[in-house]
Each structure stands twice: as structure tokens, then as C-alpha cells.
Amino acid sequence: MKKITLLALALAAFQFNYAQDTCATAAVVTAGTHTVAAVDGTDIPDPICADNGAGATAGEWYSFTATIDGIATVTTDLPANAGGDTRLHVYSGACGSLTCVGGNDDVAANFLSEAEWLVATGTTYYIAFDDRWSNAGFDFEITETAVTCDYSAPYAETFDDNNQFLVCYTIEDVDGDTLSWITQQDLDLDGDLIPETFATNASGTEDSTNKDDWFFSPALELTAGTEYQYSSSYNVLQGTANASLEAFIVDGPSSTANVVATLFTNAGFTTQGEFETLETMAYQESSTFTPSATDDYYIAYRSFGPRGGGFLLLFDSSLDTTLSVGEVAQNDFNHFYNKDLKVLNLESSNMAMTNIEIYSLLGQSVISRSLSNTSESISVSSLTDGVYIAKVTINGNSKTIKFVKS
């Protein structure tokens, strides 16, 4: 009995050490922390999904099946790996016909690695590490973040949540230059030590060809016969040519979808303001449209024109039912958020407010209450930090505002 037990343990150890040495024998892993004893497998990751090219002579392979729709992250940037040097690749598909969906060599602060990619429930992905720089063992961690894309009007996007951007927005690189729309969340434009967030599109090196990059919002269910107000702000970090941007309402997240309405076109514009005032001095666009059918619609942005136009910066994009013309327009209405007291203060000059609805960026009502005065203070201490839309009703008409709870 003891000999059989020892043999079984030896076989188990053999499987632990060598099961992940090839794609075909990839070790099955789930969300959590796992240990790589050494990078010594015979199957070198291919294609290469990380920086710094060829040179690896060994690999270790793992198979991961997503349990949510959203974002998965794999990282070796852990305290236990301090001083280490790793490189990783993430694939979809089957062994022998793999497609890169993520990869990384070095994170910003060290030589460890981290990658995130879109995942769908029940889909299997392969994670592979190579010995490009070291064959020493290390730990790695996998996490999953669920993301929902249930948007509706009022819709307001300030690009604070990169996971929402990755999962819910559609990018189309029609010109094929790989320089399409992305988010940038760590650029402090105004020097207040708080990063500004925006969607951005790089125009690339100046040449004889034009940009053609599309960026689509999530589906927005809109009602037939209802007039909607659109607004956005944007600017450009100047390059060697002028930038061009246009926006549409379309019936699908594709450059070939039907255009329901043209929201604006601005061809050949230049930087407005200085670096620290790129957002406060941004171009402002506003227009209205009325859908003829109740359906899902999308806001589409297209970057076009000559290359060399610098970096387009799209700061925000919003859509809501239009404000009524008349008494509300003539009434002086103001609001300000008190960060210390976590209170949204509202002031109406000559008409009492009757109701307030506060929505998250996903269109979910988070606060609803009746009002009766020309001056009101709304506690928002129960809300998580983030951007919210408030719709205030005054004499049967509405005023929509945006505020940041922090």
C-alpha cells in the first residue's frame, strides 16, 4: 500500500511540474493567485503578444475560462515577485491557431507584467509566460470584473471608467493604421494633481493618406417623436496638420450603419487654449434631433482628415430630452456641489422647484424626491463617488445638470 501511495504522489508531482509546459497540456486555472515553479516548458508562446520581440526559449501555459461578461486581468505585479522580470501573452482560439487578445512585458514601475482583456462567460482563454528575460518562478493573479452596458437617456459620458469604455463602446479602425480611439486616464492637464479623463485618437505621422477612425457609444433606447438634446466638448493637442471630427446618430455600431442625424462636423480645427486649459477652453457642440421610431440608437464619432493632426481629446458626450422653452429658460437656475458636506445645492430665482431625479451614468435612478422651495439642499452622502445626472423639475419643465460626487 505504501509503495502504491508513493507512486501516486510521484505521478501527481510530475503532472504538477510538467502539465503546463505546452498549450495542449495547459493547466486549468480560475480567478485567484497561482504559482509558476519555473519557466521551462518546451512550447514557446507564439504569436508574440507583448513588447520586445523574439528571444524566448521556453514557456508555461494556463487555460482560463471566464465566468462573467466584462474584463479579466492577469498580473505578476505582486509584492512576492519584487525584483523579478516576466513577460506574458493572452490568447483566444485553439492551440495551433491562437489570436492575441492581450499581453505585456513591463509595467510602468518595474519589469513585472500585467494585461487585461475583454471576456465573455464560458469562453476559454490561454495565458502563457515565456523566459525572454528570466526563467525564475513567480506568482500570478487573475481577477474578473463584471461590466454591464444597460444605458439609456439621460446619458452622460465623461470616460472615467475604462472598463465601461472597453466593454460597452465599439471602436472601428477603418484606415487600418492601428491608431484608433482609446481612453487616457492619467493625464493631469490643469496641474491640480487630479487626472483628466477623455477618449483620444492619435492621427499618426503626417503622410498623404487620411484618418478614418470610428467610435460608437453603447446602444441608447430612444422614444419616437421625442426631441433629444445632444452636447459634447473636445479639443486637440496640435500636430503638424489640423484635426477633423464629426458626430452622428446611427442605427448600429458600425461605419456602414444608417445615419439617422448629423450632430456636427468640424473640419480642420486647431488647438484651443494652452495645455492646462485644453478642457476648459474646449470646443462645445450642441444639437437636437427627433427619432421617428422607438429603437436603439448610437452616437458615432469619426476622426478624419490628413494625418499629423495631433491627438483628438473627447472630454464628454451627453444626450437627454430637450429643455422646454419658456419659463425655465427665463428663470435663473444655479447649482453647486459642496464636497465637504456631500450636498448638492439648488437655487431657482423666481419659481419653486417641484421634483429632482438623480441618475447614475447607466441611467439608473438613485435618488428621487419632491421639492417645494426656490432653494433646496440635497444630501448625496449615500451615493458612491462618481459622475451623476440630476433632472430638476420647475413649473412642469425640466433642467438637467451634471455633477461629480467626491
Image (cartoon, rainbow, N blue to C red):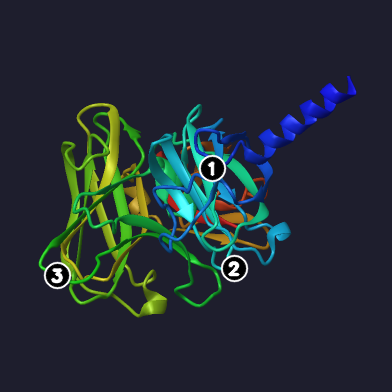
* Residue 255 % position (x, y): 19, 43
Residue at disc 3, secondary structure: loop
Residue at x-position 48% and y-position 57%: 56
Residue at x-position 55% and y-position 57%: 131
Residue at disc 1, secondary structure: strand
Q: Which mark is residue 207?
A: 3
Quarter of the picture containing the N terminus is: top right
Q: Is residue 202 left or right of residue 404?
A: left
Q: Is residue 380 left or right of residue 253?
A: right
Residue at x-position 41% and y-position 57%: 183
Q: Which mark is residue 372?
A: none
Label located before the other in sequence (3 or 2):
2
For mark 2, does the 10 Å Cα neighbourhood hold few (<14), some (14 to 19), or many (20 or more) residues?
some
Q: Which residue is mark 1?
A: 72
Residue 32's place in the image compared with 242, above or below, is above
Residue at the far left in the pictured view: 208
Where residue 159 sits, quadrant-wise, is bottom left
Q: Which residue is mark 2?
A: 110
Structural distance between the alpha carbons of marks 1 and 3: 37 Å
